[in-house]
Amino acid sequence: MTQKHTCLIVDDESDIRELLMMTLERMDIDTYSANGLEEAKALLSQRPYSLCLTDMQMGDGTGLELVQYINEYHAGLPVAVITAHASADNAVAALKAGAFDYLSKPLSLKQLRPVIEFALKLTPQISHAPSDTLEMIGDSEPMTHVRHMIAKLSRSQAPVYISGESGSGKELAAKLIHKNSARAEGAFIAVNCGAIPENLMESEFFGYKKGAFTGANQDKEGMFQAANGGTLFLDEVADLPLPMQVKLLRAIQEKKVRMVGGTAEEAVDVRIISATHKNLVEMMEAGQFRQDLYYRLNVIQLKMPALRDRPADIPQLANLLLEKLCKNLGIDAPKIEQSTQDYISNLAFPGNVRELENMLERALAMCDGQTITIDDLMHHEEVRIERRKVPRDEFHKLPSTNPNISPDVKLPEYLEEVEKRAILQALEKTNQNKTAAAKLLGVSFRTLRYRLVKLGLSKEAETALEDELEAEE
């Protein structure tokens, strides 16, 4: 027989307690109630609970004190705090203290039910299961801390702000928080705030009604509605214009949105995770980002370390990225020489993981298919020496990092030979599949076809390109 869930309700107003008890009992949840802090502590010592709902202000204490008490003596018990309608600061304080979520008065059943359902998913058997953060690669101290934080944040509904340099893995962290949370079955909606035109932002976020503007031929839901029951990831949130920041703040505080052209607000249950590589504190001081929105988004902060701050992780990460690249191309992964691993471990990587992946893609195109050497990396600060086509004795006086070319060698011919070798090796690795070869080289299919013609490597490509140009004319 399955044991029923139990909930502790703490409120000094009897009518609120009765409303909550009736609602929970309809959901087949046993309820126990306390009229204040001390009575709640006594009930907590008598039996385990699946959930606790507490008012913020009570006669003998506060909900914040109860949250702190539960975190210390009954760790793992989800607590949702009930706040007054305009007490946004109290809600943020409760979330920072460890509350699972918050509810605003007057209580709405549409808001209450999702909070209870999500809390009940955080049962002991789930909370003790290992978190799925294996995709966050690295055994360094910074990455161990990141995985610990992801596991902790996955048990909360609090808004999370992820900071870090471009390419450091902010979106991956957001996905893992969602994937390991009680919202895992809901949608994960990611939006780049800097990629939406300002005049379309409100309709993209909140949706629009038919006839709201020219071209609105039917109702269309926005990203808040699409993420209902799940997580909305706001990437590059610093790029939101000030008028949209005001609307976003209201949606987060009220947990309601109004479609463009609509008259009624609708409740939405969305967890907000935001990220940017910009300094929001400096933007606040400059008046470019609202202070109230910042504190609403930055309830809990997760800082992603730069790749250069965890050099010990780079070889492991490089091998994993290389395996993924080769798997997508259907080829065997070459081995990265130890000297090459040592070399890349000492690079600065201003573009972080994204730059490392791009470097490996280039190296994959240039290597012999068996091993990746330092020479294959084609680091942007180096000029590689083409040894197979150009006589070695013409370059023996030049160090590999010297940007000058011997006056006896014509630069265009030299570059063409390097390009030919790269293209031919890519085609060989992909069994002459031009689409896969273009991807391996990091260029479009049409660019590859053009280069094949220009370098005299394919008559077939020349014919296809001529046909395409005639069609365009």
Image (cartoon, helix red, strand yellow):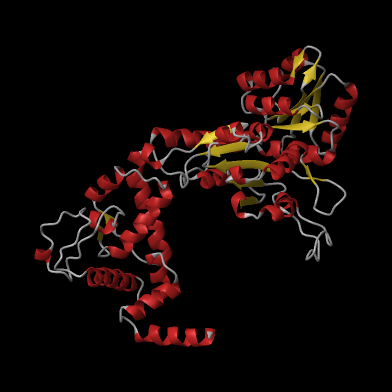
- Residue drawn at x 28%, y 73% is 420
Q: Is residue 214 left or right of residue 442?
A: right
Quadrant of residue 462 within the rendered picture: bottom left
Where does the image place residue 388, in percent across and percent down from the top left?
17, 69
- Residue drawn at x 59%, y 31% is 285
Residue 433 visible (yes or no): no
Where does the image place residue 451, in percent across and percent down from the top left?
36, 75
Numbered disc total:
0
Q: Quadrant of the N terminus?
A: top right
Q: Nearer the viewer, residue 178 or 31?
A: 178
Quadrant of residue 447 within the rendered picture: bottom left
Residue 271 visible (yes or no): yes
Where does the image place residue 424, in percent across and percent down from the top left?
30, 73
- Above or below, 140 relative to 35: below
Where does the image place residue 137, in percent across and percent down from the top left?
42, 44
Quadrant of residue 10 within the rendered picture: top right
Q: Is residue 107 left or right of residue 290?
A: right
Q: Nearer the viewer, residue 174 or 332?
A: 174
Q: Is residue 295 left or right of residue 404?
A: right
- Residue drawn at x 71%, y 22% is 47
Q: Residue furthest right?
A: 15
Q: Is residue 243 left or right of residue 439?
A: right
Q: Nearer the viewer, residue 20 or 449?
A: 449
